[in-house]
Image (cartoon, rainbow, N blue to C red):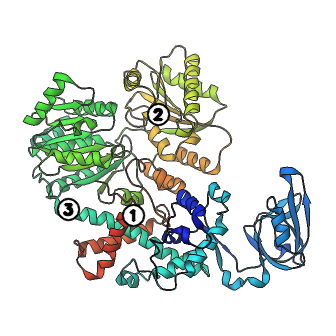
Amino acid sequence: MFDLTTRDIKYLSGVGPQRASVLNKELGIYSFHDLLYYFPYKYVDRSRIYSIRELDGAMPYIQLKGEILGFETAGEGRQRRLIAHFSDGTGIVDLIWFQGIKYIIGKYKVHQEYIVFGKPSVFNGRINIAHPDIDLASEVKLSAMGLQPYYNTTEKMKRSSLNSHALEKMMKTVVQLLNEPLPETLSPGILAEHHLMPLTEALINIHFPSNPEVLRKAQYRLKFEELFYVQLNILRYAKDRQQKYRGYIFEKVGEVFNTFYSRNLPFELTNAQKRVLKEIRWDLGSGKQMNRLLQGDVGSGKTLVALMSMLIALDNGFQACMMAPTEILASQHFETVRELLYGMDVRVELLTGSIKGKRREAILNGLLTGEVRILIGTHAVIEDTVNFASLGLVVIDEQHRFGVAQRARLWTKSVQPPHVLVMTATPIPRTLAMTLYGDLDVSVIDELPPGRKPIATIHQFDNRRESLYRSMRKQIAEGRQVYIVYPLIKESEKIDLKNLEEGYWHICEEFPDCKVCKVHGKMKPAEKDAQMQLFVSGEAQIMVATTVIEVGVNVPNASVMIIENAERFGLSQLHQLRGRVGRGADQSYCILVTGYKLAEDTRKRLEIMVRTNDGFEIAEADLKLRGPGDLEGTQQSGVAFDLKIADIARDGQLLQYVRGVAQAIVDKDPNGALPENEILWRQLKALRKTNVNWAAIS
């Protein structure tokens, strides 16, 4: 049999060059194989016939058997439509077409028995079905029809008559060509041990299942395989690196750490911080290179844990480096670390793009001599001119803002790769973390330091501005500061910037006694920094901004976050923005302002925000509502979710199960030498060559 992967889709019966071009551009379907792996999004039971008297307008797709009693046309011009009166003896429904009227009248005959399939609706008290599928009753074997597949299509496809029904016909043609089994992509051992359907059987039944049970087995087989190879790729990569790279052994916790712990620690560590430090301490002494992801909500004390980890590096004669995505965030980390190390003999320096001349030269020399023991900076720290005497630990903050290649460049700054601690304030659901950061060990700080009050979150409609401004005036009178955030979405950038400008002038008029600053990503960096500095210093009481302030502005005095058009933000983004307040000891507030008309999933998002401050609960809910591709960070991190059938949100249990299967194989066969696993390594190699982008994060 010919190879499905090399057979061009244009040679499939009923396709041709023109339709092939549409399939290429719209769905990325180039071969018979690509088509076979384009799975249905839903199925409709075609084995049951309903009677017309059973119908109501709320039913999903149904099937009727009867005859056309007669045709009539109604309306003029674009409103013109063809109506066929269809009866099965229990009642009459109207079949309606708005296009192809001549073709329909020529094709279907009065008083001939047909099977009609479509979605019933009610118009002017009569049940009708618009643009139904119609087949001659004599040509349809209902028992063989089973569940009918439905495929997602685009507007461009529909214009080329490539609707779901057309794809179904093409799929039938490909399936009929499968007169011998396709090469298996899982080993016989895995198929037998996990009771999986063979590949060819699964592919036929995912498109044309005879019943729900067969469909479930086909879906399980294909989901298992997809998730299994994602995990096998990540775990094999992690194992390779473990074998390849040894880690510096930090044998002791010494004078620097102990001095800090006994004299400078600002408050008692939470149990979560202690647990995470133990995990990091174990990694640093294990002889393997640490590669750990530290998750924790805004304000949970990640920076303190990172600093204490860096002090262990110092105690063992190494330097440490912390990299942040923006100058403002790097400067804030620098100030925080300097404050925490006050009175200690530890030289800490800040290196950003704006530090030049003699000052920069002094820092670079200090790194080479080892006098600079901790360097904090932006991506400037990975420039070729920056070299260390002995770099032992790298901390990367808000790591999704950096590309994989940028992070990898830090490894070249040392004789052997330094230990890596990656931090994020974006809570990542467990299932997503296993796919995004599957090769990293994960630590979670899930407690806030004592004395922090949960932020009170309120949903308010935009027609209640007066009470909103009263609350703002009260907070400002008490010496607090306020953020007002507007959306800035690419698709409507001009309108959004106009709204922000108008909002800014409106606030200036409403609060004439206050200094109001304005920040958005389209401003020049120097202008943006100057405006942010007005707010950080307390000179400005109100900041009107876009989401550029989502990461990197730490103003403990700011106690109110107002989010305009909150319905346009995702849950994780709302949670990140809310985290800009609540950093001091005062009660803080987050006010979500929306219009009155809201979609159901928007209402759910806002209800979750009002109900909980738990970032992990919010991240899980966001994953379920929006899917992994939209979640904060996944687009920037270099990981594309090209999953065709599995769903990380819904198939979390299966993901964990297949990870265990993949882990056992990697542990038993780390070099891919066992004959029983030959199929697995060959398939993994083939997948890596295709456009499936399962980049492991390092």
- Residue 101 point in image, percent of width and height: 83, 62
Q: Residue at x 56, y 76 (%)?
A: 174
Packing grade of label 3 (10 A; few <14, some 14-19, many >=20) is some
Point out the tag, 3 or 1, that comes first from the N-terminus.
3
Mark 3–mark 1 contact, CB under 8 Å? Answer: no
- Residue at the far top in the pictured view: 513
Q: Secondary structure at mark 1?
A: loop
Q: Nearer the viewer, residue 313 or 82?
A: 82
Q: Is residue 440 above or below residue 389?
A: below
Q: Is residue 109 above or below residue 276?
A: below
Task: Name which quarter of the figure residue 105 lies in.
Answer: bottom right
Task: Name which quarter of the figure residue 84 lies in.
Answer: bottom right
Q: Is residue 327 above or below residue 639?
A: above
Q: Which residue is denoted by mark 1 in the rendering?
A: 690
Answer with left or right where residue 670 lies relative to residue 525.
Answer: left
Q: Amino acid at mark 1?
A: Thr
Q: Secondary structure at mark 3?
A: helix
Q: Is residue 45 above or below residue 583?
A: below
Q: Secondary structure at mark 2?
A: loop
- Residue 257 point in image, percent of width and height: 15, 42
Q: Which residue is denoted by mark 3 in the rendering?
A: 242
Packing grade of label 1 (10 A; few <14, some 14-19, many >=20) is few
